[in-house]
Amino acid sequence: MTPPVSLVDGADTAPVSRPRIGGPLRPLIWTLGLNGFAQALVLGASSVLLGLEAMRFGEAGKVDALALLTTSGAVVSMVVQPFAGALSDRTRSRFGRRVPWILGGSVLSGLCLLGVGGATGLGQLVVLWTLFHLAFNFVPGLLHAMIPDRVPQPLLGTFAAVYGAASLAGGILGAVFAALLADDVFLAWTSLAGVLVLAAVLLAVLDRDDSTLGDRPEPLTWKHFRSAYWVSPTRYPDFAWAFAGRFLMNLGYAMTTTYMLYILQDYVGLGESAVGVVPLVGLATLLGMTLTTVLSGPLSDRVGRRRVFVAAAGAIVAAATVVPLLSPTLPAIIVFVFCSGLGFGIYQAVDLAVVTEALPSRAESGAGMGLLNLAVAVPATIAPLAGSAVVHAFGTYAPIFLLTLVLSALSSLSVARIKGVR
């Protein structure tokens, strides 16, 4: 696969101060954004729907049931994403390296969602949710890999912002959507399956990647498979610090979002009425994220700097957690989600550009992005377990906010150590 070339209107490969998207990049940016939205919509809705499913097993067992469901899927994510990236790096097809796997993974995961909607017991839910993640996790790393494959450096921030904004909107609207369909979870799961498949089909039809039938990639050996799960931090320190920053930020943010429904129910004291408040919390988060996401990525392209944005994002999220720590009330939660949304919006808009520039090799960007996405999948595994342990140990959700504060601050410090990205 040849390195990405400049497709900026009116320019060659030289950097430009105010690049504009042209040529085949136009359908790419919108279909990537649509698929990012669809992926996040499913995950955002599942954060509520799985909580509702877990509540069927009793008040005392809901935390453990939710932890089991989310952990089982996240464990599969850790195994699948780097392997999927390495496999796609060596794929030969008339549709390119990424699209066949994205389409196939989306269709199979959509079918699994239909099964989840019809499951009747915890065992069925765990099996089907695990199978869903097996197929689903062939997709996000490959969507991310299409950016270093095809996007020139002056546009990385803009592409990251569009993808980040779409993902944030999908995640928040997914939670709102799930709350509105809380009385008909089968309809919710079925609708999500349809959106997921439709987005992948549109990517396959509208975005035409170059054929790789003429490529002669190295066979996928045990050495390549092993390297998909490990990059030397001494040889590639920027990659290691980018991974650490992403890991810490996602772990801190997941600590609160995973248990937000239960925080509203038990920490704030809303009880059963908490489900009706979820849309308000979601919209406050979306407002905060939107304000910063749409500006941060293009602004980072304009000024030619990335790290300062991502480091500031961690500091803002850390500061926001002080509010619900001091005041366990609904207004405090609204202030928290709005302010943390401001920070996480900056993070989502620019982090993808940072990690793209920190990749060890663009020729194997699928494997690199798959490994970097473990910094999202592993926190999704740890956060439910850590949250469950905290609640059982302290009998309250307050320490979860304290952990978010510490982890977000450490994320900022990690990003500041990256030397090869401005």
Image: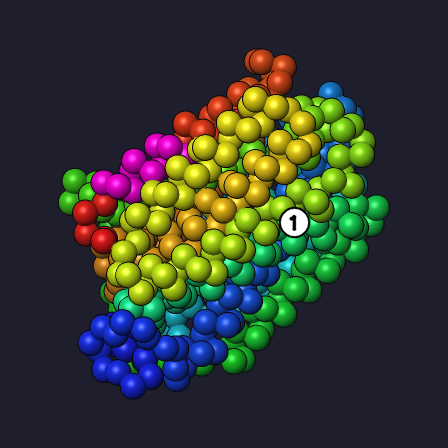
Type of amino acid at the residue the image marks with label 1: Leu
Residue found at the very far left of the displayed protein = 235
Residue 342 horizontal side relative to residue 417, left or right: right
Front residue of 162/223: it is 162
Residue plotted at (34% across, 69% down): 155
Residue 183 horizontal side relative to residue 258, left or right: right
Q: In this view, does 270 lie above or below 203?
A: above
Q: Name the residue under label 1.
A: 283
x then y, percent, for residue 397:
60, 22
Task: Please tell me in which quadrant of the rendered image residue 211 appears.
Answer: bottom left
Q: Would residue 221 be seen by someone viewing this image from the given angle?
A: no
Taking the magenta stretch, the answer to whether it contains residue 415 is yes
Q: Would residue 269 be seen by someone viewing this image from the given angle?
A: yes
x then y, percent, for residue 190:
74, 58
Residue plotted at (73% across, 21% down): 60
Front residue of 137/288: it is 288
Front residue of 211/221: it is 211
Quadrant housing the N terminus: bottom left
The color scheme shown is rainbow
Boundaries of the magenta span:
408-417
